[in-house]
Image: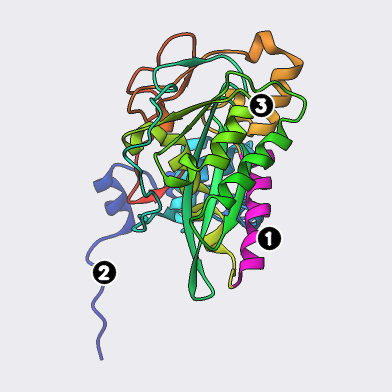
Amino acid sequence: MTTRKQAYSNNSLYRAVGITKQAVHQHKKREKAREPLVRELCDQITKVRKDSPGIGLKKIYTLVKPDWLGRDKFVSLGLSLGYGIPRSRSPIRTTHAIKALYHPNLLTGKTLTGVNQGWQSDITYYFCGGRFYYITFIIDVYSRRIVGYAVSDSLRAEANIAALKMAFSCRKGASLKGLIHHSDRGAQYIDKGYQSLLEGKGILPSMCLIPQDNAYGERINGTIKNDYLWYWTIESYSQLKAGLKRAVRDYNEIRPHDHLPGEMSPCQYEEALMRNPEKYGQGVFIKPGGRPEDYSFSTSPAHPSEGKSKKNNGADTN
């Protein structure tokens, strides 16, 4: 058997593409020196994903901050190594509106200047153990902190009431009079017991006609499910409750938030705000029909183009 000789030399190939043999060897040398750094980086990403399995690469960069790599190159490298996060859509409806009972939208178009001025609440589902469970969240829009949550095996108002009481406990000692509680028009939020709790604290009920006007409540549903729960083995109600507690703690205390100053976590931001309100006490404009990404820390309404992130082959890098 005869072997055909190579019809060209490496040197001629290098000349054809406009590089030198020395440059090729230098590149190989750099790549070899970078191998242990890349391995260490993979270990760091894996460690972060252990407690926050669906966290995007941009947020991981904020946490690990490698001194030899910028954010964009970190994201690109992470995607090439298979660390992108695919996303899926939610097909289950959890809102059953009562059209005759409705509170006007008081939140959209307002500028919030501190915590406990605007909360958003929403309900999502989670399937495990052969059945659906329903999770209620309440978010402080200003700090993005989850102040209350509850899980239930039904869409009755009891879970929403439990989440609301947790929110009251979280903000114990603070005046909630005049706070706007914003939600969709679900029957759980019209419930007399729920409305009575709001009234007892002087909280103003507010409701949206379209999901886009409850954007942050909707967004937190996906964040907790897509970035945490769906990566863990959850096969029972008790495991779901434990996983939810773990996810909320990581989200509130550790996970960087793109739209908070310094990409702090919500709890870190609230602590910084208490220490230095003049530095961090800026306005948050609630854009009509806007996504959470359009909420901007500024003294004027956010421009529609602010905060939008680029898509990368269907993988979430945030």
Q: Of residues 189 and 288, which is closer to you in this image? A: 189
Precedes in sequence: disc 1 or disc 3: 1
> In the image, which residues are magenta?
236-255
Precedes in sequence: disc 2 or disc 1: 2
Mark-to-mark CA distance, 2 and 1:
63 Å
Which tag is nearer the camera, tag 2 or tag 1? 1
Q: Determine the residue positioned at 27% across, 46% down.
A: 17
**Whether residue 27 can be seen here:** no
Q: Is residue 209 above or below residue 122?
A: above
**The quadrant where residue 153 appears:** bottom right
**Whether residue 261 can be seen here:** yes
Disc 3 element: helix
Q: Determine the residue positioned at 70% across, 20% down.
A: 175
Q: Of residues 269 and 24, which is closer to you in this image? A: 269
Residue 180 at x, y percent in the picture: 52, 24
The disc at residue 242 is 1
Residue 6 at x, y percent in the picture: 26, 69
Q: Amino acid at mark 3?
A: Tyr
Q: Amino acid at mark 1?
A: Ala
Disc 2 element: loop
**Mark 3, residue position:** 269
Q: Is residue 6 above or below residue 249?
A: below
Q: Amino acid at mark 2?
A: Gln
Q: Determine the residue positioned at 44% across, 24% down.
A: 295
The disc at residue 6 is 2
